[in-house]
Image (cartoon, helix red, strand yellow):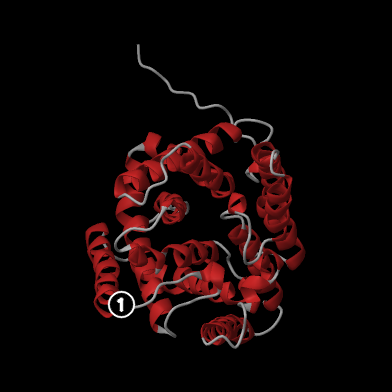
Amino acid sequence: MHISHRNLGIDALRVFSIAMVILGHSGTFDGSGLLSIWRMPLFFILSGFFLVPYRRSLRVEVARRWETLIIPYLAWSMVITLVVVAVKWNDPADMLHQLYTGWRGGTGRSAFWMSSWFLLTLAVSAIILRYLERSARWVAWTVGIAGVVVSRIFAYLQDIEVLDGHPFADLPLRLGISLPVIFYLLIGQEIRARIMPLVQELSATRATSIGVVLIIAPLVLTHHFSIPAHYIHAGRFGWPVITPAIAITVTIGFIMIFSTWINRLLHRWTLLGQVVGRLVRTGSTVVLSHGLILLWMHSIGFNSSSLGDLFIRFGVALSTAFTVGLLLNMTPAARALSGVPQERPVRVAIAA
């Protein structure tokens, strides 16, 4: 099957991965571990998928990440700061605590900065990986794998109370997590270089069928054997080899489905493809704003652990965050808050 240079299915998968981040933050539910085992690896693997080796110089990569990730992080941090001041004005001690932990990041960060860590982690990981391209390929793999192994050792020492915390997660802005994340960026690069050419030779039906198996089978095993999930923000990567392997397999399954069947559907339905193209450019805004929406939902009473409240929180946060992103991207604030150029307003032609 021929796949166009711009695979709209992969763009849709990126939107889906962000939606799953929001779902994971909306609350826990029976089987939520089956979501946590792959949702953050999917996000980072897809980021690596688009980080083509040797395409950019280190200087260009730094400039790119500054523009698309770091500036939106700083801009939204200012917005969040104003929200914290407004909400906590009558409790100065808590206000200062929220501001300090939010800007510092790391363990114990303010809930107002709920998801900000992984934008900076992604930026730093991509820059380090680009720097490592100056050496042989095995050097980058050594750094990435060593990052996962050392993080696992730290988690074990924390569990047996040899360490009071996880050194990677405790660093300001969780910058230590950038090292193990390099492993997932490399996996994304390998999937693009080695798996995608094979997928392109399959029919959409066959690729989708294989993809469904690659998603369901590992998750059945995960449930049956109670395999621990990923909690990357805390430096926890589950069981050695097994947990990452499950996340990678599930990710490949999603890529096979979205890059073939979903891609063909989006190219057939032009308007839907255009919507996906716009949604995918709201990523930074959605990641940085949905936490505020979830906190607001909690404050107005949608704070129970019931499945109904969870899906209400998820639905409101999902639709509101993406709507805010779409609207912001049509304003001069797009560069600062989303890290993308300003887009033209949507024009819908209505037949007479």
Name the residue nearer the viewer: 136 or 345. Answer: 345
Q: Is residue 178 left or right of residue 246?
A: right
Secondary structure at numbered mark 1: loop
User: Hey, what amino acid is under mark 1?
Assistant: Ser
Instruction: State the quadrant of the C terminus.
Output: top left
Residue 343 versus residue 140 in the image, above or below: above
Q: Quadrant of residue 50?
A: bottom right
What residue is shown at x 57% (from left), y 72% (from top)? 181
What residue is shown at x 64% (from left), y 75% (from top)? 168
Q: Is residue 145 visible?
A: yes
Q: Is residue 200 visible?
A: no
Q: Is residue 329 left or right of residue 39?
A: right
How many labels sit on residues?
A: 1
Q: Quadrant of residue 64?
A: bottom right
* Category of crowding for the residue at label 1, using alpha-carbon neighbours closer than 10 angstroms: few (below 14), some (14–19), many (at least 20): few
Name the residue nearer the viewer: 178 or 249. Answer: 178
The residue labelled by disc 1 is: 226
What residue is shown at x 64% (from left), y 30% (from top)? 331
What residue is shown at x 36% (from left), y 75% (from top)? 246
Residue 263 in the image: state x and y as whole percent. 36, 51
Q: Residue furthest top?
A: 352
Residue 286 in the image: state x and y as whole percent. 54, 45
Residue 9 versus residue 315 in the image, above or below: below
Instruction: State the quadrant of the N terminus.
Output: bottom left
Name the residue nearer the viewer: 53 or 95. Answer: 95
Residue 97 in the image: state x and y as whole percent. 70, 54
Residue 101 in the image: state x and y as whole percent. 69, 58
Q: Is residue 176 left or right of residue 180?
A: right
